Image: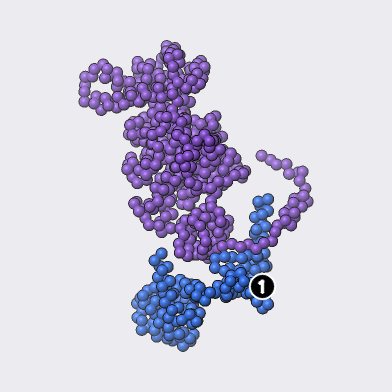
Chain colours: A blue, B purple
């Protein structure tokens, strides 16, 4: 669809301008801004509402920058987006930029869910086995979910490896019903 | 139905369970997943699912399944076969790697199921062994043969003038409340004791209407050979969209096993409405009357699956009678013209006839059957020729006779005969007739045995005649069925029977 293509274009431009090595930082900054819009209604309306002038936006963003350290480019990017009225696509742009970054760096992002805190040596062995499996570097995001009961659940892209007790129990239940 | 459970000890049950649990293999559950980003009106948009195939079955939480209909750059749109309130944004969706299937087989006969083959009649689970794909491509030319056997509807006007063959698609079209469904139900009732399994697919009807239909079929003892597939108006649009395909898959089971099935889609207008709703929510471009561009294919792929199979492939058949509802008799609408062009003929029911007391309100002039003639039994063909001629002449003269006061004797006779024929073709609901009775009654009309009877006496005459023949001339009825054609000897016998009865008949 048309919208997806546009989102891709902005994501591409972002990465090209900040350079591939600075990309994670500016993506993080954008994510912080996105989180702020979700948190504060006033800030959201500042960016979304066309009644604010770009001058007003700039002062606010500059003040913000003093507090959470935003790079100039990020501020410009956000201002440009809000001026064009496509700031609402920010989450999609962030997602698209992240994907682009991983693609260029030949990395993959994995979400690992465990019921308890994971130990250092377990983490290392997990990282190496995931690397072997995916044939590329893996950036891991850890999440705790006690409802898994035990085992581990790994999501990479649109594939899910599930060895958690919760899903084993579900499979067992299905098997028993089938008889 | 009670099962003796006293003989089973609880230890035995736990032993069984333990064995199954020890056999259970612990394995890594690898699945491809996506996340729901939009949900509403029976449609879900799912982000991810990179390798999802078109029409693939997807597993949503709470045991709800969906079907992928739109594959986009990094998302998939799917329709849900279940309550969409149980799925929410952010839920995880799994690929199943399968396409949709439905249970089929004889265990379904006598049952009422919903659009995904689950029982809804409260008679317990259905023990089917086989499943079939819901969306399949219709059999090719090599696997078919021309229609050659009749499907008796038990309705005089149809069996005589617009015969339907086994494997044919014949459209029933007309306004609301004009007897379209009644026609299907009579046809189903008429298959009682025969070799045809009937499937009644109710789409977008009111739930009480379906209940009434099922009750009526039960009452008439017709549920013994019938499956009812119901997707009522209260169910989500995807269910109404898929129901005809599910019903068709159930019918194909009989067709491909060398048996005969009849399926009534009641009605396809509602299915097109459901599909239009889905397509608009799926953001497919709307075309004429906001239907999507493939609404023709929606019906053609369904109706093409009705077929008469060649003898090498078992010689089974699937006859389809789709129903289309028109608005104020307008058959030139989008959906009606589509379905008219797909089917092998149509039965047109007309409000003027219906309110003029001619029921079934079949318009003999506009109704045609493009292949059925080859499928009529010879005896019926012999008398139907006369009937059609009488009616055609009557229609021609009736228009002309309105202006003329003085008519010659021949013309008057012609008009009188026509009036009697129309009277003769009237038939009550829920009383389909065996073909031999139809032949005797129509024979009496075309041979002029009714010309001296007043019009109001025709109905009692017909009833009396059939009662007499059933009581005293069983062998005559048998002979008609066995011979299949009327030779001089048989004609004489029928004439004799009619004359004997006529002597005893007083209006």
When the figure is inspected, residue B330 is found, relative to residue B500, above or below; the finding is: below
Point out residue A63 in the picture as x, y percentages from the top left corner.
44, 86
Q: Which residue is mark 1?
A: A116
Q: Quadrant of the C terminus of chain B?
A: top left
Point out residue A166 in the picture as x, y percentages from the top left corner.
65, 63
In the displayed orientation, state which residue is furthest to the bottom: A66
Out of B66 and B274, give the one closest to the viewer: B66
Q: Indicate the quadrant where residue A42 lies.
A: bottom left
When the figure is inspected, residue A174 is found, relative to residue A104, above or below; the finding is: above
Out of A139 and B213, give the one closest to the viewer: A139
Question: Is residue B40 shown to the viewer in this render?
Answer: no
Question: Is residue B15 shown to the viewer in this render?
Answer: yes
Image point (36%, 22%), residue name: B386
Image point (75%, 55%), residue name: B18
Q: Quadrant of the N terminus of chain B?
A: top right
Out of A91 and B455, give the one closest to the viewer: A91
Label 1 packing within 10 angstroms: few (<14), some (14-19), many (20+)? some
- Left or right, B496 with respect to B193, comes to left
- Left or right, A71 with respect to B409, comes to right
Q: How many marks?
A: 1
Point out residue B204 in the picture as x, y percentages from the top left corner.
45, 46
Point out residue A169 in the picture as x, y percentages from the top left corner.
67, 60
Out of B200 and A106, give the one closest to the viewer: A106
Image point (40%, 51%), residue name: B294
When the figure is inspected, residue B348 is found, relative to residue A127, above or below; the finding is: above
Q: Considering the numbered disc 1 on the image, is that residue within a helix, a strand or a loop? A: loop
Image mark 1: chain = A
């Amino acid at each position: 669809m048309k919208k997806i293509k546009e989102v891709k274009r902005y994501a591409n431009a972002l990465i090209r301008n900040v350079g591939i090595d600075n990309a994670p930082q500016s993506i993080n900054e954008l994510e912080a801004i996105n989180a702020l819009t979700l948190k504060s209604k006033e800030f959201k309306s500042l960016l979304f509402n066309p009644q604010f002038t770009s001058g007003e936006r700039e002062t606010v963003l500059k003040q913000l920058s003093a507090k959470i350290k935003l790079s100039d480019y990020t501020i410009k990017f956000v201002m440009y987006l809000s001026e064009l009225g496509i700031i609402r696509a920010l989450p999609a742009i962030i997602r698209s930029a992240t994907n682009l970054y991983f693609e260029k760096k030949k990395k993959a992002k994995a979400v690992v869910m465990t019921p308890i805190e994971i130990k250092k040596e377990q983490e290392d062995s997990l990282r190496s086995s995931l690397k072997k499996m995916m044939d590329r570097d893996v950036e891991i995001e850890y999440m705790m979910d006690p409802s898994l009961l035990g085992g581990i659940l790994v999501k990479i892209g649109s594939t899910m490896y599930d060895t958690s007790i919760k899903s084993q129990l579900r499979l067992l239940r299905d098997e028993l019903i089938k008889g | 139905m009670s099962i003796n459970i006293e003989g089973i000890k609880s230890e035995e049950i736990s032993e069984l369970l333990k064995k199954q649990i020890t056999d259970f293999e612990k394995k890594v559950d690898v699945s491809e997943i996506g996340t729901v980003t939009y949900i509403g009106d029976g449609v879900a948009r799912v982000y991810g699912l990179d390798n999802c195939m078109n029409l693939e079955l997807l597993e949503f939480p709470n045991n709800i399944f969906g079907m992928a209909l739109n594959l986009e750059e990094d998302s998939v749109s799917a329709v849900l076969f279940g309550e969409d309130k149980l799925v929410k944004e952010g839920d995880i969706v799994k690929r199943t790697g399968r396409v949709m299937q439905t249970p089929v087989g004889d265990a379904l006969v006598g049952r009422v199921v919903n659009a995904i083959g689950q029982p809804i009649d409260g008679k317990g689970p259905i023990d089917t062994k086989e499943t079939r794909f819901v969306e399949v491509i219709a059999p090719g030319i090599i696997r078919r043969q021309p229609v050659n056997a009749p499907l008796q509807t038990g309705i005089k006007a149809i069996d005589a003038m617009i015969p339907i063959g086994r494997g044919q698609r014949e459209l029933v079209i007309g306004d609301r409340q004009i007897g379209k469904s009644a026609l299907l139900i009579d046809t189903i009732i008429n298959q009682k004791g025969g070799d045809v399994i009937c499937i009644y697919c109710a789409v977008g009807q009111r739930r009480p209407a379906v209940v009434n239909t099922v009750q009526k079929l039960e009452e008439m003892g017709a549920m013994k050979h019938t499956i009812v597939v119901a997707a009522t108006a209260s169910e989500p649009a995807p269910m109404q969209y898929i129901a005809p395909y599910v019903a068709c898959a159930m019918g194909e089971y009989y067709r491909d096993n060398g048996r005969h099935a009849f399926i009534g889609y009641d009605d396809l207008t509602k299915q097109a409405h459901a599909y239009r709703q889905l397509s608009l929510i799926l953001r497919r471009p709307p075309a004429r009357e906001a239907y999507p561009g493939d609404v023709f294919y929606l019906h053609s792929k369904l109706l093409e699956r009705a077929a008469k199979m060649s003898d090498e492939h078992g010689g089974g058949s699937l006859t389809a009678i789709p129903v289309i509802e028109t608005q104020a008799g307008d058959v030139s609408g989008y959906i009606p013209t589509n379905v008219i062009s797909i089917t092998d003929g149509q039965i047109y029911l007309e409000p003027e006839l219906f309110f003029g007391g001619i029921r079934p309100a079949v318009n003999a002039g506009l109704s045609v059957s493009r292949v059925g003639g080859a499928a009529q039994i010879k005896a019926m063909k012999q008398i139907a020729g006369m009937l059609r001629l009488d009616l055609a002449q009557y229609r021609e003269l009736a228009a002309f006779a309105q202006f003329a006061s003085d008519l010659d004797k021949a013309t008057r006779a012609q008009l009188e005969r026509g009036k009697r024929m129309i009277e003769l073709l009237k038939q009550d609901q829920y009383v389909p007739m065996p073909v031999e009775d139809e032949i005797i009654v129509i024979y009496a009309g075309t041979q002029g045995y009714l010309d001296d009877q007043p019009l109001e006496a025709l109905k009692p005459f017909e009833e009396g005649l059939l009662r007499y023949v059933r009581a005293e001339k069983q062998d005559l009825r048998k002979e008609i069925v066995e011979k299949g054609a009327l030779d001089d000897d048989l004609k004489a016998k029928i004439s004799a029977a009619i004359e004997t009865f006529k002597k005893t008949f007083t209006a």
